[in-house]
Amino acid sequence: MNGAHTLLETLVDAGIEVCFANPGTSEMHLVTAIGKTDQVRPILCLFEGVVSGAADGYARMSGKPAITLLHLGPGYANAMANLHNARKAHSAVVNIVGDHAVWHHQYDAPLTSDVPGHARLQSHWVRTSESAEDLALAGAEAVQAASSASGRIATLIVPANHAWEPATRSHDKLVPAPLERVPQARIEQAVQALGAGRRTALVLGAGALREPALTAAGRIHAATGATLLCETFPARLERGAGRVPLARIPYFAEQAIEFLAEYEQMILIGAQRPAAFFAYPGVASLLAPKACEMLEFAGVDDDIAAAMHALAEAIDAPREPAVQERVVNEPAGEALTPAAIGDVISARLPEHAIVSDEGITCGLELFLRTQGAAAHDWLAITGGSIGQGLPVSFGASIACPTRKVVAFQADGSAMYTVQTLWSMAREEADVTVVLLNNSSYAILNVELMRLKAAEPTPKALSMLDLSRPVIDWCDVAHGLGVPAERASTVAEFDAAFGNAMATRGPRLIEVMVEQNVGATLRR
């Protein structure tokens, strides 16, 4: 056996089942090892940003890590943007990064770089194997680190000679660190705060947005009247009919400040203090009132569900909280506005679907219009680095092959990781891409209005315009192996989306959106 084989055996014993890969020369022994086992599913992606984004989506829905296979520093660098999103989502990911053989570094070959330096930018845990014999232990430690608490980014760097040199044995699985128990004193503090008569919001994120914790939150709301708020960009929110509803903190800072102005205290549960996405002249960065008290009840690495259940019991909350009713709205007119698109999706979304939202400006409306849709999971762009939506939807489909996945996708950000369509076709992933074609970086037009830098010139506006030439998304999808059709009216979109929900396999619906930038800003 060589180091690559002992590493792979170790990863399999630790529970690894999927490898999202874009390998190169220094990873060929690992490729060979994967090719000799039927216990790891290799999935080729044509760009490393797809690799890392897919691993993120897989982790969000499976609750466990996949491995990524990346090629030296440049390969890792290509994966960085979606690893940034994965870190913000608290996703468990194990990166395996091949490096030059140890003795080859001295020659400063073209692909030589500081791989550990790259990896430390996004990774919670970084290690370079010390020998072929050490590689198995390093692999066990990587999975342990990634699987600990709420999830971590772990990066193992493998010098090529450690993969091909002889090694004698794999390593047993190492037990990851569990979630932390919330101290009783913190529960008692929350009980006192909830009984103090102040206008209160529970700000929920991370594990607090899963159904067991949400049910407890609904009970607390029923007992105290505390408002349930969701962080603006949740990694995974279980919502829809039959689940406890909550309001999402608005994206635009001015709206969020107004939205939160009434609260005298906030209890943070798996979420940080609400802060603006960007700084703006004359606008506060922290969105809650200055006098609003902040109580940190549970962090992302705490056992949030258990703590919230204990809190609900401590205040003798009702057993059954109020839940969202099923709502079906008929779209008004035939214009494909964001509201009309949302109404169609809400009406036809099947039970237990998964929605990956990178709709950017249109996504604000979609979230509101799907509140009463059938029960579903919502995956948001956690770190704000665009190019997440397609890979995350693909990874979610790999994790949950029996569930329908909808990628609600803006056109500009889709171009960052368009290669995902090819992997969807190759793996026959059951993903429907709703591609919103407004031929613009529309969110940046909104931001241009908000910043009031100066009256924009045609040259300035050209930097936000995708209409010269207009991207033909049906042709793009067909070229990458995904069936596609175009919808220009509500009736056309309703027929196309309904058909997509009734059949399996990847497909793309190019939706020609009518959107008013000023209206978006007012929302």
Image: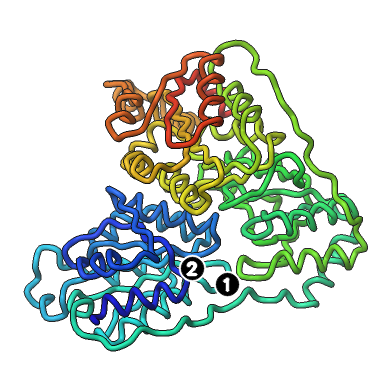
Could you say whether the residue bearing mark 1 is in a helix, strand or loop? loop
Going by the numbered disc 2, the residue's amino acid type is Arg
Going by the numbered disc 1, the residue's amino acid type is Ala
The location of residue 437, given as percent across then percent down, is 42, 25
Whether residue 227 appears in this view of the structure is yes
Foreground of the two, 177 or 450? 177
In the rendered image, the vertical position of residue 291 relative to residue 352, given as above or below:
below
The location of residue 117, given as percent across then percent down, is 29, 70
User: For residue 152, which numbered disc appears in the image?
Assistant: 2
In the rendered image, the vertical position of residue 101 relative to residue 500, given as above or below:
below
Q: Quadrant of residue 141?
A: bottom left
From the image, tell me which residue sits under label 1. Answer: 149
Foreground of the two, 497 or 121? 497
The location of residue 129, given as percent across then percent down, is 29, 81
Instruction: Please give the name of the residue rendered at 40% of the width and 73% of the height, measured from the top-left corner.
Output: 11
Foreground of the two, 478 or 392? 478
Q: Are marks 2 and 1 in contact (CB under 8 Å)?
A: yes
